[in-house]
Amino acid sequence: MIDGPYFVLTVLGVLGTGLTAGVFCGFSAFVMKGLGSLPPAQGVAAMNAINRAAVSPAFLIVFLGSAVVCAVLAVVTFVLWPDDGTVGLLTGSALYLIGGFGVTVVANVPRKETLLRMDPGSPEAAVYWRTCVSEWTLWNHVRTVASAGAAVCYALALG
């Protein structure tokens, strides 16, 4: 059984990756659908406002803090190689670091930054918006599943 500081780190991993999965799920389930139903200029303006607001201490602590916890758990697991939970801890770390954090960096953030550089009322923004909504949402589904999977793996490792 996992115990001591290692237990606390794993619980933090469950909480952080689970909270992040919930945020991503909300976007996949209804936020992007709502934004996608707006006229392009309004959708772009609303998405840009959300993207600016998302870079807040509260979200960054959970999102980036979870990445740090996952990386620490992976390193500690490799070093200690515990009898219990090794597969769950390593799988959870990989899921979040690659599927949650990594996908954000390589797929969602570049789309967000492209959109932020556009004038919401421009013809270019209108054309890009339709592609952005579908591609951003697809990658957000990946982030949701990976983050939720990480939380489940960590929870199972505790048992």
Image: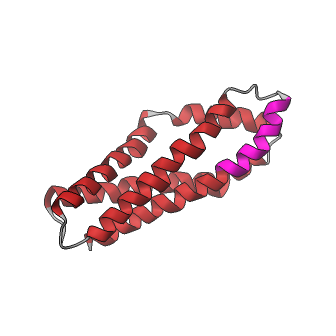
Q: Is residue 125 magenta?
A: yes
Tally of numbered discs = 0
Q: Quadrant of the C terminus?
A: bottom left
Compared to 71, does 92 lie above or below? below
Q: Residue at image x 16%, y 61%?
A: 80
Residue 39, position as x, y percentages in the image: 83, 40
Visible in this render: residue 20?
A: no
Residue 106, position as x, y percentages in the image: 55, 44
Magenta span: predominant SS is: helix
Pick whichever, 97 or 126, lies toward us.
97
Magenta residues, as a range?
123-136
Q: Furthest residue to the left?
A: 4
Q: Quadrant of the N terminus?
A: bottom left
Compared to 142, does 36 lie above or below? above
Q: Residue at image x 66%, y 29%?
A: 116
Q: Furthest residue to the right?
A: 123
Q: Residue at image x 15%, y 64%?
A: 3
Q: Is residue 53 left or right of residue 70?
A: right
Visible in this render: residue 14?
A: yes
Q: Furthest residue to the front?
A: 78
| Image quadrant in which you'd find residue 50 | top right
Q: Is residue 137 magenta?
A: no
| Image quadrant in which you'd find residue 26 | bottom right
**Structure colour scheme:** secondary structure
Compared to 109, does 15 lie above or below? below
Q: Residue at image x 53%, y 37%?
A: 54
Residue 7, position as x, y percentages in the image: 21, 61
Residue 79, position as x, y percentages in the image: 18, 58
